[in-house]
Image: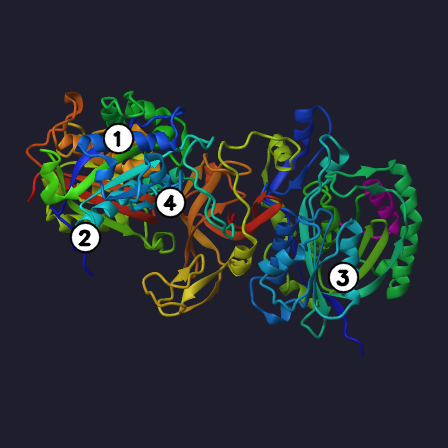
Amino acid sequence: MASHGIRDRVAIVGMGCTPFREHWDKSLDDLLIDAAGLALDSAGVTKDDLDAYWFGTSQSAASGISLATPLRLSGKPVTRVENYCATGSEALRQACYGVASGAYDSAMAIGAEKVKDGGYQGLNAFPIPTDGTNRTLTAAAMFSLILPAYAERYGVDEDELRRVVARIAEKNHYNGARNPLAQFRRETSADAICEMPAVAGRLSVFDCAGVADGAAAAIVVRAEDALRYTEAPLYVKALSLVAGDSSGLVDPDYDFTTLPECAAAATDAYAQAGITDPRAELALAEVHDCFTPTELVLMEDLGFSEPGTAWRDVLDGTFDLDGDLPVNTDGGLKSFGHPVGASGLRMHYEAWIQLRDRAPEERRANLRGRTKALIHNLGGYPGEMLSFVGIVGSELD
Amino acid sequence: MTETRGILAYGAHVPYRRLDRAAISGVMGSGGGRGWRSVASFDQDTTTMGVEAARQALGSGDSSSLSPDSLWFSTVVPAYVDKTNATTVHAALRLDAAVPALDLGGAVRSAVGSLRAALASSGRTLVVASDLRVGLPTSADEAAGGDAAAAVLTGSSADGPLLADYLGGASTTAEFLDRWRTPGDATSHTWEERFGEQAYGPLLDRAWSAALADTGLDAADIGTAIVTGLHGRAVKRLGGRLGVAVADDLADTVGNSGAAHPALLLADTLDSADAGRVVALVVLADGVEVLMFRTTDALASGRPSRSVATQVEDRADVAYPTYLAWRGLLEVQPPNRPAPSRPSASASLRRSDWKHGFVGSRDATTGTTHLPPSRVGIGGGAVDDMEPAPMADNEGTIVTFTVDRLAYSPSPPIVFAVVDFDGGGRMPVELTDVDPTEVAVGDRVAMTFRRLHTADGIHNYFWKARPVRG
């Protein structure tokens, strides 16, 4: 089995991201037009200059027509992609491969979700006809299974672990409070989060990502053409995707303390990018903090902490804005909410900002001379998951 | 020589929940009374309770001698009309398609009538009776009723050892308005109590005499009389004049479970009766049915795993307002989540073994059990290298669990556990009959057939896990 990657063959030369909000006044089309316009302006191109489009949305629309119509794209190949909550990253992955293959010189990856027209809190999947025996648990409840399992396996007191994950939320809200694109811009203390009533297992509402509408887009071109568009491109070092076979729901050996699909995608991505010591080599990481326990175990599955030690690193501030390896410097899903199709590209947008020194001073990560960022974006649940891990860098290797 | 007919097996289901009758007057200011009544959980209906009783009757073994060649299901409250409910029971029991499954419903009398008909018939007939008794708040029916199911496998001595021989009996029938309910209504009406009592008197006298004549028995031969019927006053007054010891009617612990009650009381009596005891089952329902049995030596070793008394003890109270909400008598705000959609008829048929029978698959090469069944195994990968793995009777252990206060449920919160089954196999499954504050990793669970929800008039049946207590 080969996973060769396309290291340094494709570059991101423009990006755009709308504010993530309850956009009562904006439709899906509005969000797409806004994000596409920001990305096109950023790269200094027009929609007609681009050769192909990949549009990620999970539940808001179907088919490439849903992008071609609002943008009025004429005669272009436009594909809608969907891969659960990793849909936005999947759109980017397809666009990069389209360019790397030589089929196109340039492409747009765009992701959007209009969640707030549904009339309910939370994400609600379109019902596919089934035999009615499928699980009806919320994602929050599925991810809440991590905490007792982790406490048991590593001998951490459950109350202490509950504080640890609240500390993750505190960190992400600290960062989000300094990001004008984020939906929730108020700092929240770990103490306050621990006091909140549980909604799923021991998780409170503040252990869960919020819900928002939003869109983000990236323009990708052949790496050799990158400097024609911008003096500061980001080069794509790795794009990895692993879709699990759901064996965690069947296999008694799975213990809910790790997300194996994420670990496998990380291993593949590091090989593609030539990274051997991620904690030392990465400038920052944007990871899928859909729920606070998710970010905890991701620190181990992505190789930032040894198994069973991430909780200490969290308390030590390793992943804080000024820590050794800042994680979710933009505020993460915690601060942004999670418009499913857009989130993966929103994560890349933060790498686009930070690695190119465009972040505002108050939330600028200390890059320590490092030039690469990791983007992790997952879909599904513990035991039944798919994971994207991408790496981008501001320099050619 | 004619073969003796009688009871090959029996079983009962008393739901886990109880309503303290004092709680009714505590909320309403009137109604209620002393003792408790049984309450079907929000995820139970007459069909699912019937399944549980039938599973008790058929036991956990696969003994073909105990498999029925007919299934008759009786209830006053069918989950469906137009469509047969016995077919759901049939599917949950994994009976062969050649076993006919019929509903004989509509009235309390149908249940005991189907038992008589099965005993008078040939072959092995599983007679299942189930009832869910609802009365308007503060009514006598609300307090006196109970929810339960019972099942009796009838057959002949040639089929296997009879636990009780059927000795014969008699029946009287009369048309009079003692109680009635229009189809679609949840509750019944009754005429003045004294009228029913006098109407039943001669009907009982005649049936009783005829039953004694039919069986050649003398009242003194009868060890236990089970006297039941929804007319409480008539049952009490008239039963007393038979001159026979009358069995406990479970009024203080279960309530009167209507169509299910004759078989439930029969099961309760058989749970403790010694061999050679003559038991008279006397049912007052639009006439009187009298059935005479004599227990055998086989009874001691042929009882179901969970006696009625055990199930009466395994209980937890439900708050009265919650009870009202479960029965639809009090509408409460549902979670702000979309209600589940209806299950697909075609998908449900394709996966009936799984959905109704809880049959997974076992990889013939790796031995790994897959829940739900899978054509391609984990850790192996061969296609269609699977054999059926019936798991409904396997207990399991909770590996981890969570309480979901956000998900849609007819009665939130959802308690959900990852369960590892004895003999292999893992599944994340919803728990029921459970207190969210009392679940622990390592708890033992057993599977139970439930109704998850109803959408577009389609009842979505599947299995949940319930704690094994005691």
Quadrant of the image occupied by residue B7: bottom right
Is A335 one of the magenta-colored residues?
no
Chain letter for mark 4: A
Residue A37: mark in rendering: 1
Quadrant of the image occupied by residue A190: top left
**Separation (CA) of disc 4 from disc 1:** 20 Å
Tell me the residue at 86%/37% (across/down).
B191
Chain letter for mark 1: A
The colour scheme of the drawn protein is rainbow
B25 horizontally vs A108: left or right: right
Chain letter for mark 2: A
**Separation (CA) of disc 1 from disc 3:** 89 Å
Q: Which residues are magenta?
A: B231-248
Residue A101: mark in rendering: 2
Q: Residue furthest front?
A: A74
* Element under disc 3: loop
Residue B277: mark in rendering: 3
**Separation (CA) of disc 2 from disc 1:** 26 Å
For badge 2, the amino acid type reads: Ser
Tell me the residue at 74%/48% (across/down).
B76
